């Protein structure tokens, strides 16, 4: 609820890597692994009907149920992990963002624009 124990899903196109960073909680048993999970993922480039080279958009579907997070990217990459928090096992909010990367892990770099085109959150049976 205070934003201190948050999980971040990010994609790094330069490294072609999907990264899931989980909260580092010291209150839990020290043998629980809280290290980030990663998976390789490449955005495909194709020639559209106008003969232009186009990179496919990044599509992320993430499902969180009590303490399990499943992330699916463009129908071909999947990461599943456990999320441990000291609070009740409830998700307190979702924030979406898109930003450029300068190659050093900082936003605001050159290249094509990063644009968040659509974001939908489902809570139970209804979209919110």
Image (spheres, rainbow, N blue to C red):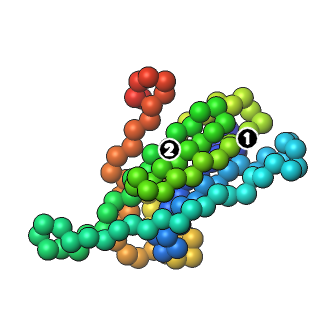
Numbered tag placed on residue 125 in the rendering? none
Where on the picture, by quarter, is residue 91? top right
Apparent side of residue 59 relative to residue 10 in the rendered image (left or right) = left
Q: What residue sits 87% from the left and 44% below the top? A: 29
In this picture, residue 118 sits left or right of residue 16: left
Direction from residue 55 to residue 41 in the image, left or right: right
Can you say which quadrant of the picture contains the C terminus? top left
Quarter of the image for the N terminus: give it: top right
Q: Residue 44 sits in which quadrant?
A: bottom left
Q: Residues within 10 Å of mark 2 (few under 14, many from 20)?
A: some
Residue lying at the far front in this picture: please name it.
76
Task: Quickly name the residue at label 2.
Answer: 62
Which residue lies most toward the top here? Answer: 125
| Image spot of residue 116 (x, y percent) | 37, 53
Tell me if I can see residue 76 in this picture. yes
Q: Position of residue 69 (x, y in %)?
A: 59, 42
Out of 102 and 12, give the one closest to the viewer: 12
Q: Relative to 108, does residue 18 appear above or below in the rendering?
A: above
Helix, strand or loop at mark 1 = loop
Residue wearing tag 1 = 84
Residue 125 x/y as whole percent? 44, 23
The residue that appears at 11% across and 70% down in the rendered structure is: 50
Element at label 2:
strand
From this viewpoint, which residue is outermost toward the left?
Answer: 50
């Amino acid at each position: 609820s205070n934003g201190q124990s948050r999980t971040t899903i990010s994609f790094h196109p330069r490294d072609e890597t999907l990264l899931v960073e989980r909260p580092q909680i010291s209150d839990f048993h020290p043998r629980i692994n809280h290290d980030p999970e990663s998976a390789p993922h490449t955005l495909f480039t194709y020639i559209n009907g106008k003969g232009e080279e186009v990179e496919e958009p990044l599509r992320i579907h993430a499902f969180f149920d009590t303490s399990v997070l499943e992330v699916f990217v463009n129908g071909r990459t999947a990461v599943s992990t456990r999320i441990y928090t000291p609070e009740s096992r409830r998700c307190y909010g979702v924030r979406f963002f898109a930003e450029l990367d300068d190659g050093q892990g900082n936003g605001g770099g050159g290249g094509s624009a990063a644009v968040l085109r659509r974001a939908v959150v489902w809570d139970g049976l209804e979209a919110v």
